[in-house]
């Protein structure tokens, strides 16, 4: 892939799009595009942070594994999102594992060495990275809030209400950004619980589920489930 195409990808990031062309060109010059198969590892927790990444196509699951082997999903990254900034700028090692979740996932890999050189030499990049890390901090705060909800039904309802939807009134159409197995892991529930909740809500006329397409038939009831989880199961 040409530097011009990588440059276009970087320019899509909110905190890079206003950078001067010469600065963005230096970052693009130290970048390449890599393709991953579904399930292929991008990096392991504890590895030296060799790069930061931008998702071009597909998706990436970022997760940690506890000492007892339990996997906790931290983030699902989609096209147009970036990750690895804090590892490169501060930790110098990746604090979690990252795996591609779709066949043909493509990432722009920005070399840590070349990126840090630009970062040290040109202060114009600093403000952009502060913006990036603020986005991550906001995302982590939302994730903590999401996982602090003890009721699985409320957790699922809150997740669905935060997703972009087509339509201005019921039914609202949501295209899930991940497979249901991945969604269950993201919400820290077992797949069987997710399936049971969706079947129950479908029977009650709250949602209609078809693969990754989900219609919200009764947004008021879904909001009520998000607030208290009443009747949603656990």
Image (spheres, rainbow, N blue to C red):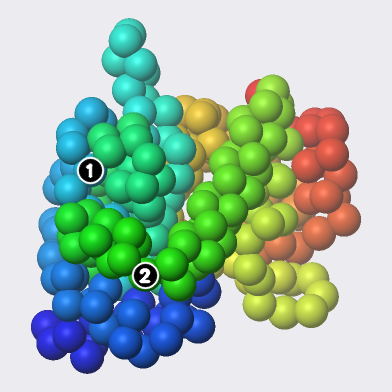
Q: Residue at x 23, y 43 (%)?
A: 49
Residue 233 at x, y percent in the picture: 70, 27
Between 168 and 221, the one nearer to me in the picture: 168
Please report the residue visible at 22 percent of the width from the left and 55 percent of the height from the top: 112
Q: Nearer the viewer, residue 97 or 3?
A: 3
Q: Provide the secondary structure element on which disc 1 rests.
A: loop
Give the quadrant of residue 111. Answer: bottom left
Residue shown at 57% from the left, 41% from the top: 140
Secondary structure beneath dot 2 equals loop
Closer-to-camera residue (130/59): 130
Q: Residue 108: tell me if it is visible.
A: yes
Quadrant where the N terminus is found in the figure? bottom left
Residue shown at the point (38%, 52%) measured from the top left = 85
- Residue 150 got which mark? none
Q: Is residue 62 left or right of residue 222?
A: left
Residue 49's tag is 1
Q: Are marks 2 and 1 in contact (CB under 8 Å)?
A: no
Is 135 positioned to the left or the right of 230 in the image?
left
Q: Quadrant of residue 80?
A: bottom left
User: Going from the N terminus, do you reach mark 2 or mark 1 first?
Assistant: 1
The picture places residue 165, in percent across and down from the top left corner, at 65, 71
As drawn, the residue found furthest toward the top would be 68
Q: Is residue 143 left or right of 19 when viewed as pictured?
A: right
Q: Picture coordinates of residue 168 (x, y %)?
A: 79, 79
Question: What residue does disc 2 label?
Answer: 122
Q: CA distance from mark 2 to mark 1?
A: 21 Å
Q: Is residue 72 left or right of residue 207?
A: left
Q: Residues within 10 Å of mark 2 (few under 14, many from 20)?
A: few
Residue 107, given in percent of the width and then of the height, sits at 23, 65
Q: Quadrant of the C terminus?
A: top right
């Amino acid at each position: 892939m040409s530097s011009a195409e990588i440059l276009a990808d970087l320019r899509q990031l909110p905190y890079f799009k206003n950078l001067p062309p010469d600065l963005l060109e230096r970052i693009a010059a130290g970048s390449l595009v890599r393709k991953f198969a579904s399930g292929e590892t991008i990096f392991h927790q504890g590895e030296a942070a060799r790069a930061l990444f931008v998702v071009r196509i597909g998706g990436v699951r970022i997760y940690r594994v506890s000492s007892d082997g339990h996997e906790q999903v931290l983030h699902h990254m989609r096209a147009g999102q970036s990750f690895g900034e804090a590892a490169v700028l501060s930790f110098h090692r990746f604090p979690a594992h990252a795996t591609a979740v779709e066949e043909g996932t493509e990432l722009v890999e920005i070399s840590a060495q070349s990126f840090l050189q630009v970062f040290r030499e040109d202060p114009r990049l600093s403000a952009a990275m502060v913006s990036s890390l603020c986005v991550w901090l906001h995302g982590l705060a939302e994730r903590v809030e999401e996982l602090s909800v003890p009721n699985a039904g409320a957790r699922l309802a809150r997740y669905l209400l935060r997703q972009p939807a087509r339509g201005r009134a019921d039914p609202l159409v949501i295209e899930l950004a991940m497979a249901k197995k991945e969604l269950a892991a993201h919400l820290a529930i077992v797949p069987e619980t997710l399936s049971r909740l969706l079947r129950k809500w479908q029977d009650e006329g709250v949602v209609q589920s078809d693969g990754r397409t989900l219609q919200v038939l009764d947004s008021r009831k879904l909001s009520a489930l998000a607030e208290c989880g009443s009747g949603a199961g656990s």
